[in-house]
Image (tube, rainbow, N blue to C red):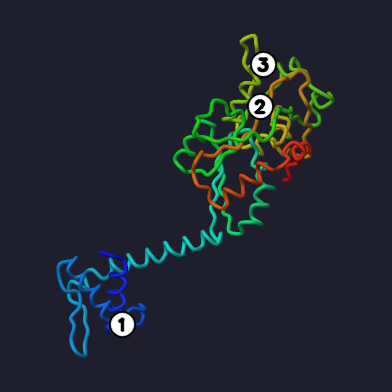
Amino acid sequence: MELHQVRYFVAVSRLLNFTRAAEHCNVTQPALTKAIQKLELELGGELIHRERQLTQLTDLGKLVLPTLERLVSAADSARAIAREYQRKDNAPLKIGLTPCVSSNLLVAPLAEVARHVPGIQVEIVEEPVHRLQELLFDGDISAALAADANGLPERIDHWDLFEDHFLVLAAKDNPLADMQSVLMSALAEATWLERTGCDLTRKFWDLIFTDGRSPKISHRSKHESHLQNMVEAGLGIMVASAHTPRLPSLVARPIADDRMRWTVSLLVIAGRRYTPALDAFIKIARLRDWKTRNAETPILRA
């Protein structure tokens, strides 16, 4: 069956008049009648009793009407969604982040995207880089900002945005706060707070604890803000990416002999057609001067 046949039948069932239904559908009455006859052949029985002054649905017509009405309604909804998409009134954009990449990076670019795509609807997910690759391939996210994403498959396009490193965060009354920069050796005896899921933290600890020892970890959390609150309470220290916003009550210190650096990259699937929102986001992200913007000291407001 064809959609226009279904649409004509639904119009007749509502108006119970072939002439008015044809006018409503903007077709001639013979064309409408012929289309409904073809639909009846398709369904194997009469749908409408055609009488001189009276038009009524048959039992079969009454039986199939609710399903055919839903079909017309679904088609109309699909057209409306497509129109909104083309007008950028409804522009979903789902972005993935690896742990240790702050969502603060997205604030300014997305605000600029919103000026070009007013209907943007953003969702952010956080997963390790291997999981973000799976979500990209499956179409469950549009793009990802990933730290230290090496050995990417050829199907993933990537653009390097900026280089990042760790800073030590400590409470103001912590002895480390009195140092202009912290030696790696001074961190070996510290009590740590761990950002769970961040492989970069583990790599950093491997540089400190080269003698087979393990860091003394007092608390763990996947939420950056929770950990910073615990640092503020004097429960330990933590490392955070230099671009990550931090509480004004904390002291951030560079690590004097730390050579660990990584690149934050933008990832998308190669060859796929970009939505208007994704296209705008990619262009803005690639043109942005990340080095200058990230040089400013970010503050996390409570």
291, 234: nearer the viewer: 291
Residue ID at (51%, 38%): 270
Question: Residue 29 occupies which quadrant of the picture?
Answer: bottom left
Circle 3 residue: 207
Circle 1 residue: 15
Residue 246: image location, x then y, percent: 73, 38
Disc nearer the start of the sequence (3/1): 1
Q: Are marks 3 and 1 in contact (CB under 8 Å)?
A: no
Residue 80: image location, x then y, percent: 46, 65
Residue ID at (58%, 29%): 149
Cα distance in 3D space between marks 3 and 2: 15 Å
Of helix, strand and loop, which one carries label 2?
Answer: strand
Circle 2 residue: 262
Cα distance in 3D space between marks 1 and 2: 68 Å
Question: Residue 228 occupies which quadrant of the picture?
Answer: top right
Graded by Cα atoms within 10 Å as few (under 14), some (14 to 19) or many (20 or more), the crowding at tag 1 reads few
Considering the image in quadrants, where does the N terminus appear?
A: bottom left
